[in-house]
C-alpha cells in the first residue's frame, strides 16, 4: 500500500505530516530501533521515510528525496546531536522539501517555520509582544508572543529557518545564543526559555545568495553543513520531475497525461544541457543563461504544460504545451538570455533527430 492524502480536499498543499500520515504511522509501528528523546521515529526510520523503501508489513514508503543516501544519513544524524543543520545548495535542489520532511518525520510537526526575507525582524526569531496586553498590564507571560523557534525550544521539536542568508546579519546573529547555549533570554521578564531535549534547528540557504548576507563565522560554526547537489544523472532528474508532477497533478485535479514521459525527458534534457554548457553527448558546447534552470523549475514547466493540455488541448502533453514554459524559464534576461536560447534552438534542437515538432513549437512561441 502507499500513503494517501488524509486531509480535506479543499487543502491545496497539506503539510508533510498530513499528506504522508499513513507512511509515518506505518514506519512508527515497524520501527524497533532506538529513538532520540522526543523523536517520533529512529534515525534509521527517518532516513527510510526520506529515501523510500518497503517495510516488512508490505507498506511502500515513497521516496521524498532522490540523491546520495549518505547525505541524508549525515543530515539525520546531525539532528540527533547538539549541532544545527544547514542545507546548502543552488536554488531548486529540494532544500525546503527535505527540511519539511525531516521536521515532519522527527517531530511530527513541520510548521515551526521562520521564512527568511530581507525584512525579517528579530521578533520572528526570538519573540514579540501582544501590544494590547503589554499596554494594559505591562510585560508578562500573557503578553509574550513566542516565535516558532521559541516554541520548538519549549516543546523539544525541530524548528526551520528558510533562506537564512536572506535575513539581515544582525537578525541572523540572534541564533548564536540559541544554538550555542540552548537558551533564549527574555530580559523584559528577567527569565529565559531553555531548550528541552529534542530541540534542534534546520536552516536552508542557496549558493546564489552568497554575498547578500553572509553568515558570520560564529554562526556558521554552530551548523553542520550538508550540500544538496543537483541530480547526478538525467534518469534521476526525470524520475524526480515525473513523481512530483504526478503528485501536483493529483492535488490540482489535473488528469494524468498519457505519453507525457517523452516531453518530461525533453524538458530535463534542455535544462541539463543549458545548465552544464554542453550537450549530453559532449560534442557541442552551448552557452548558459543567467537563470538556474533547476529541477524545481522543470517541475513547474511540466505542470504548467499539463494544465494547458488538460484545459486547452486533448489531454495529451505535447511539445506546444511545454514550449512557452521552457522559454519563460530560460529567458530571464531579455537581452542576453534570448541570444543564448536562439543559438541553442538553432544549433542543437533543430538538428536533433525526433525533435522537429519541439523545434517548431519553440519557434512559434519565440516568433
Image: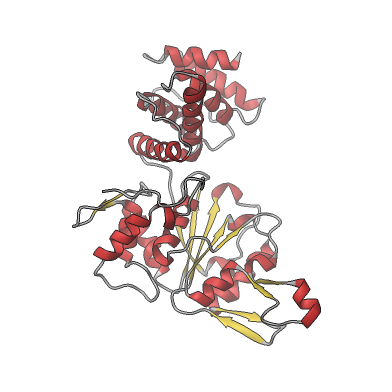
**Quadrant hosting residue 175:** bottom right
Q: Position of residue 299 (x, y in %)?
A: 47, 36
Residue at the spot 55% in from the left edge and 54% down from the top edge = 205
Q: State whether residue 309 is above or below residue 174.
A: above
Which residue of the protein is positioned furthest toward the left in this rendering? 56
How many numbered discs?
A: 0
Which residue of the protein is positioned furthest toward the right in this rendering? 135
Here the colouring is secondary structure
Q: State whether residue 49 is above or below residue 268.
A: below
Q: Position of residue 120 (x, y in %)?
A: 68, 59
Q: State whether residue 151 is above or below residue 335.
A: below
Residue 313 vs residue 159, the one in the foreground? 313
Task: For residue 346, say whether it is visible.
Answer: no
Q: Position of residue 125 (x, y in %)?
A: 63, 67
Residue at the spot 33% in from the left edge and 35% down from the top edge = 235
Residue at the spot 51% in from the left edge and 30% down from the top edge = 304
Is 203 positioned to the left or the right of 34 in the image?
Answer: right
Task: For residue 217, say whether it is visible.
Answer: yes
Q: Position of residue 1 (x, y in %)?
A: 26, 48
Amino acid at each position: 500500500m502507499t500513503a494517501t492524502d488524509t486531509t480535506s480536499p479543499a487543502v491545496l498543499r497539506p503539510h508533510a505530516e498530513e499528506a504522508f500520515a499513513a507512511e509515518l504511522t506505518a514506519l512508527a509501528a515497524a520501527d524497533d530501533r532506538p529513538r532520540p528523546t522526543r523523536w517520533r521515529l529512529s534515525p534509521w526510520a527517518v532516513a527510510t521515510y526520506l529515501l523510500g523503501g518497503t517495510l516488512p508489513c508490505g507498506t511502500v514508503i515513497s521516496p521524498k528525496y532522490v540523491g546520495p543516501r549518505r547525505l541524508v544519513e549525515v543530515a539525520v544524524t546531525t539532528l540527533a546531536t547538539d549541532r544545527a543543520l544547514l542545507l546548502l545548495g543552488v536554488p531548486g535542489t529540494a532544500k525546503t522539501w527535505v527540511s519539511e520532511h525531516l521536521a515532519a518525520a522527527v517531530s511530527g510537526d513541520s510548521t515551526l517555520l521562520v521564512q527568511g526575507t530581507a525584512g525579517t525582524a528579530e521578533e520572528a526569531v526570538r519573540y514579540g509582544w501582544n501590544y494590547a496586553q503589554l499596554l494594559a498590564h505591562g510585560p508578562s507571560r500573557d503578553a509574550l508572543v513566542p516565535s516558532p523557534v521559541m516554541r520548538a525550544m519549549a516543546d523539544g521539536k525541530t524548528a526551520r529557518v528558510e533562506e537564512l542568508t536572506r535575513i539581515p546579519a544582525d537578525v541572523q546573529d540572534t541564533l548564536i545564543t540559541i544554538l550555542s547555549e540552548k537558551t533564549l533570554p527574555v530580559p523584559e521578564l528577567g527569565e529565559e526559555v531553555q531548550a528541552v531535549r529534542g530541540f534542534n534547528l534546520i536552516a536552508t540557504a542557496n549558493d546564489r545568495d552568497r554575498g547578500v548576507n553572509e553568515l558570520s563565522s560564529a554562526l556558521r560554526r554552530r551548523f553542520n553543513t550538508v550540500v544538496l547537489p543537483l541530480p547526478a544523472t538525467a534518469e534521476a532528474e526525470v524520475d524526480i520531475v515525473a513523481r512530483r508532477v504526478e503528485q501536483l497533478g493529483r492535488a490540482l485535479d489535473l488528469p494524468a497525461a498519457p505519453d507525457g514521459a517523452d516531453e518530461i525527458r525533453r524538458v530535463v534534457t534542455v535544462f541539463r544541457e543549458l545548465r552544464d554548457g554542453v550537450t549530453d553527448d559532449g560534442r557541442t558546447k552551448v552557452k548558459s543563461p543567467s537563470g538556474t534552470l533547476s529541477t524545481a523549475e522543470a517541475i513547474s514547466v511540466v505542470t504548467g504544460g499539463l494544465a494547458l493540455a488538460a484545459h486547452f488541448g486533448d489531454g495529451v502533453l505535447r511539445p506546444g504545451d511545454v514550449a512557452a514554459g521552457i522559454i519563460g524559464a530560460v529567458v530571464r534576461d531579455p537581452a542576453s538570455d534570448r541570444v543564448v536560447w536562439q543559438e541553442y534552438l538553432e544549433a542543437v534542437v533543430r538538428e536533433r533527430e525526433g525533435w522537429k515538432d519541439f523545434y517548431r513549437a519553440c519557434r512559434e512561441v519565440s516568433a
